[in-house]
Amino acid sequence: MSSLAADPAEHTLGAWAQAARSLGIVSQPSWVRHFRSDALGHFEAEGFPAPGEDAWRHMGLDALLKTAWKPAEDLSRIELPAGSGIEIKGWEDLGRLPEASAARASAGPFAHLNAALLTRAVSIRAPRNICCLQPLNFTPSLPDRTPAGWMIHPRASVLLEPGSRLDIVLDLSRLPDSEGLLNLVMDIELREQTALNLVITGADTDRILSLIDISVLQGRDSVFRFFCLETKGRQNRVELSASLEGANASTDLFGLALLGETSRAFHHYRVDHRVPHTQSQQIFKSVLSGEARYEYDSLVTIHPEAPSCSSEQLNKNLVLSDGARAYARPQLAIHTDEVQCHHGATVGQMSAEELLYLRTRGVDPAAASALILKGFVDDLLKEIPVSSAAAGLQRRAHARLIGIAR
Amino acid sequence: MSALLKISGLTVRVDGKKILNGLSLEIGTGEVHAIMGPNGSGKSTLSKVLAGDPRYTIESGSVTYEGKDLLAMTPEDRSLAGLFLAYQYPVEIPGVNNASFLRMAYNARQKSRNLDEVDPYEFEMLLKERARLVQVPEEYFHRAVNHGLSGGEKKKNEMLQMALLEPRFAVLDETDSGLDIDALKIVAAGINRLRGPEKSILMITHYQRLLNYIEPDRVHVLAGGRIVKSGDKQLALELEARGYDWVLAEAAVADLNAASGRS
């Protein structure tokens, strides 16, 4: 943190800390107050990332820091069909910190801020051997007519007890179409032989900044599958870290960013293989037009004590306009032998050769482009792990493709 | 018989290099012509220019098709007007379903003729019928366009497209290359079934063997970017037996005579 009082971030830091303190007077269990004040302490000690810091160099912090965000009423909803066996509780009803949040290894400045400013906190627990076939819908939202400049800091702590299974759909498309900041944290702990599918439907407006921070701790034989569809957003940041700590744990991360105009999305993934016989796979694609930006930054680390692991990272980007940019950074850090790891990335334009081939069969250029783009994304859309959400996401993706290809 | 396609003095450059150099050729309705020639003579360039590949720069000359200026038409308009290029190297389009693409191409043609577009079920029936005609297995329908197909399978897929789109004028660019003898017979039989009194074909080939199965009305030798000799199917047999050198030598002598006549 800079010690210069003239640093604009310093003023903002103070303002945000003040906002956190003012919220602290709300009656809450003492452990929640301690959790928040500890987080505030961490935040004040660490501060915001330095300008130009690697992880923030493409997104920058200007948009985040130059607005005086005001905490707003957080009406984020969690919906689950009755009789599912899943337990959902607000933190105010718990006697202690949820285990998944307690297991969180590290946190960045915005995760600390989330804890300090908590506007809504829930604990989601799938008891042992409960398999929930209907998805749990987590929908951040605010009251109608919330003035622009709002911010909310929801947090969900998710624990799957051994043998359980759960689908979660995090839907950001219900957020209001006004300037605002969503700073959401999910702490997930998957015990042995569990399966969690998590689907994120990104914001449907270019006025919102969203920061989604997800940490996943995986036990033996656990399966985590993730899919994120981005179609709009002023600045959408996803930071997801998965720590594979039990043998045969596997993580599949998929994402599709279909962005036009000034939409921007910045995705950062960290996967740590900490024990032998763990697998991870990542496939991320983007189609960009206008002045859109998409960043895929991924680091897979195979730790020294984790031979016999496999990992794949693939990032493909189609850039349709001169003004759009894709930043691809798949990274591998291998600290042992006998692993199978692949990584690759492509950034390119639509193939003129493919386009011509279709045109020589009588297909007009617009239809030919749409067909090629659909072909580019459709294999990924088959990977949406929550079947009840798949059709809606596919429709949304196809509609967005038509919009950005124009 | 009036020419379906008339090429006059066509000179074409790609990346600044002159590839076609005053090429002239006429193909009548219902005729099958073959163009043969050594490597680098401009055979594939001619096929790409006819299909409308924008990478080629037309320096001079003209091409009329059904009396219209072909070079002024977009690639899709050429296709809708009945021109079909069977690619030497059919393009792979990962992720794009072959049947969806073929239905889109077929319906574009229907629309251009003010006919009703066909729904997926009707189209599947039609596609099955055409696939039988050219002996293409139905498994091709649901694969990505040319993706993961062998060279021979790609050529068969081109024949399926040709059977579906029923072109009035087909340019077959080295359709025989990469085919074993069995595949060649199947592809040639398919082409023969698609022949008709109103349909013309221009076959571009390096070897004579395709012409054993598809009999041409005329055979031309392309060298140095222009037609240097034309004849009937006997010319192909002669080229097979003697190679191209004697034709090139004849052409060089003719050029010298023409030059000395002018001087």
Image: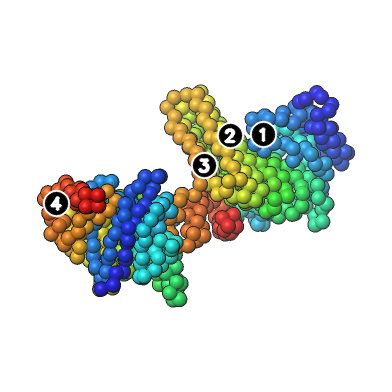
Amino acid on which the number 4 mark rests in the picture: Glu
Q: Nearer the viewer, mark 4 or mark 1?
A: 4
> Can see residue A114?
no
| Camera-nearest residue between B143 and A194 | B143
Locate residue A309 relative to residue B162 in the image: left or right.
Answer: right
Label 2's element? strand
Residue B253's label in the rendered image is none
Q: Earlier in the sequence, mark 3 or mark 1?
A: 1
Graded by Cα atoms within 10 Å as few (under 14), some (14 to 19) or many (20 or more), the crowding at tag 4 reads some
The residue that appears at 81% across and 29% down in the rendered structure is A7
Q: Chain of mark 2?
A: A
Specify which label sits upstream in the sequence, 3 or 2.
2
- What label does residue B240 carry, if any? 4
> Is there one chain holding both mark 3 and mark 2?
yes
Q: In 3D space, how far apart are the residues under numbered discs 3 and 2 (Cα atoms)? A: 21 Å
Report the amino acid beneath label 1: Trp
Which of A254 and B258 lies nearest the eye of the viewer?
A: B258
Name the kind of residue labelled 3 in the image. Answer: Val
Disc ID at residue A56: 1
